[in-house]
């Protein structure tokens, strides 16, 4: 079987990191992948007047999976001053409700924390991807230039499905103990108390998985003080967005943080980072987050199609990354290394 993969390179460092991920996927040999590239992003808006053309959305909907680099540029904005975020629009159009963000420490040297070894940090953030505070995107209220309101939107069905995904993921990971942490601010906001009550209802279906609760502010401290204590964390959209960056900082930064945006019918795999305009075009971008996102894609394809070759492709990529940035200590400048984006990509291809 050949999988059709839609490729959205996007803006800034998106094309640079994508090129390395495609090299790695091609070097695997199996599974067979056919890539089709589609225009998108702020550059596409400047050329075609639309950052996410309908043909691109349709191509993504038809594909078996989507690989996305990064989109948006600070100087390309809508008339209300907000930046274009076609990657967020795509999540909503394809209903990619589960933002899966694995956080793994590949080398002790990557963390600013003391006394940790490779593998000591190993958890997954489940970010609800299509509602929460982001439901107000492009729809918040601004009155007379003196009042602005964005609302937190929490639905029962939206919360149920992402919490269920979190519990299923905890079972798949099979840690001892299996645990899902509900991240909220249930002591203050009605929306968050509701989120927690739905979490409790779903948790009752998983008596083998430990329940855990943390307020978002306290969690920000616990993640720094005791990151080894977490397995799967589930949070509404904005909280998930913020703790994803915090957690990436614990294991070496955004250049090492992959993600999958997953729905019932489609999935988009992209690094957690943005377009990094400050380093774009200079060869300084770390391609590992994009390469690990490609591995997540293979693991998802493997599960969805019962395809052992695809699943083993994911393992092989992760092992090659581990060998290069872990054991060999090689890296781009963000990891304190002297390699450029292409050189690091090539090292990973060689390790494969
Ligand atoms: P967005 O809001 O679109 O997620 P952002 O404002 O969080 O984007 P990023 O583009 O992710 O910003 O960049 C944040 C910082 O991290 C920048 O200093 C950038 O250079 C750095 N960075 C991001 N990705 C990488 C990468 N792959 N390699 C090296 N540095 C990176």
Image (cartoon, rainbow, N blue to C red):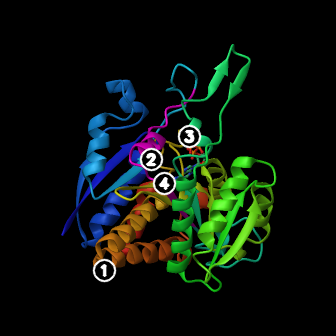
Q: Give the secondary structure at mark 1.
A: helix
Residue 239, x across and y down, in percent: 66, 51
How would you rate the neighbour count of disc 2 (Cα within 10 Å): few for under 14, some for 14-19, many for 20 or more?
Answer: many
Residue 269, x across and y down, in percent: 42, 57
Q: Which residue is mark 3?
A: 135
Q: Is residue 85 magenta?
A: yes
Q: Which residues are magenta?
A: 82-102
Task: Indicate which disc, 1 or 2, sits on the residue closer to the N terminus.
Answer: 2
Alpha-carbon span between mark 4 and mark 3: 12 Å
Task: Indicate which disc, 3 or 1, sits on the residue closer to the N terminus.
Answer: 3
Farthest-out residue, top: 144
Q: Which residue is mark 1?
A: 308
Q: Residue at left 30%, top 77%?
A: 306
Q: Give the secondary structure at mark 4.
A: loop
How many dots with numbers? Answer: 4
Farthest-out residue, left: 1
Q: Give the secondary structure at mark 3.
A: helix
Labels 4, 1: front one: 4
Looking at the image, residue 190 lies above or below residue 81: below
């Amino acid at each position: 079987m050949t999988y059709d993969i839609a490729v959205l390179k996007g803006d800034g460092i998106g094309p640079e990191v994508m090129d390395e991920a495609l090299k790695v996927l091609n070097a695997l040999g199996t599974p067979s992948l056919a890539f089709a590239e589609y225009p998108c992003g702020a550059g596409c808006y400047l050329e075609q007047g639309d950052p996410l053309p309908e043909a691109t959305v349709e191509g993504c909907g038809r594909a078996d999976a989507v690989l996305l680099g990064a989109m948006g540029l600070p100087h390309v904005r809508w008339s209300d001053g907000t930046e274009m975020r076609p990657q967020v629009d795509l999540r909503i159009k394809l209903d990619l409700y589960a933002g899966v963000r694995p956080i793994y420490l590949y080398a002790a040297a990557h963390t600013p924390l003391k006394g940790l070894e490779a593998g000591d940090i190993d958890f997954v953030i489940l970010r609800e991807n299509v509602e929460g505070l982001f439901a107000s995107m492009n729809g918040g209220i601004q009155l007379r230039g003196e009042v602005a309101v964005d609302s937190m939107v929490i639905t029962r069905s939206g919360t149920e499905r992402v919490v269920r995904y979190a519990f299923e993921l905890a079972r798949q990971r099979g840690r001892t103990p299996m645990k899902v942490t509900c991240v909220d601010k249930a002591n203050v906001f009605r929306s968050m108390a509701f989120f927690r009550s739905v979490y409790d209802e779903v948790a009752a279906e998983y008596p083998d998985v430990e329940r855990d609760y943390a307020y978002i502010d306290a969690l920000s401290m616990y993640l720094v003080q005791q990151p080894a204590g977490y397995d799967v964390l589930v949070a509404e959209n904005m909280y998930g967005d913020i703790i994803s960056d915090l957690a990436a900082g614990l294991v070496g930064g955004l250049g090492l943080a992959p993600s999958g945006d997953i729905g019932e019918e489609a999935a988009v795999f992209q690094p957690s980072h943005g377009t990094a305009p400050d380093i774009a075009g200079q060869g300084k971008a770390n391609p590992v987050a994009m390469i690990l996102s490609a591995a997540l894609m293979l693991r998802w394809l493997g599960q969805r199609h019962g395809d052992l070759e695809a699943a083993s492709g994911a393992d092989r990529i992760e092992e090659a990354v581990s060998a290069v940035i872990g054991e060999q200590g090689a890296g781009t400048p963000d990891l304190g290394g002297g390699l450029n984006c292409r050189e690091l990509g090539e090292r990973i291809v060689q390790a494969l």
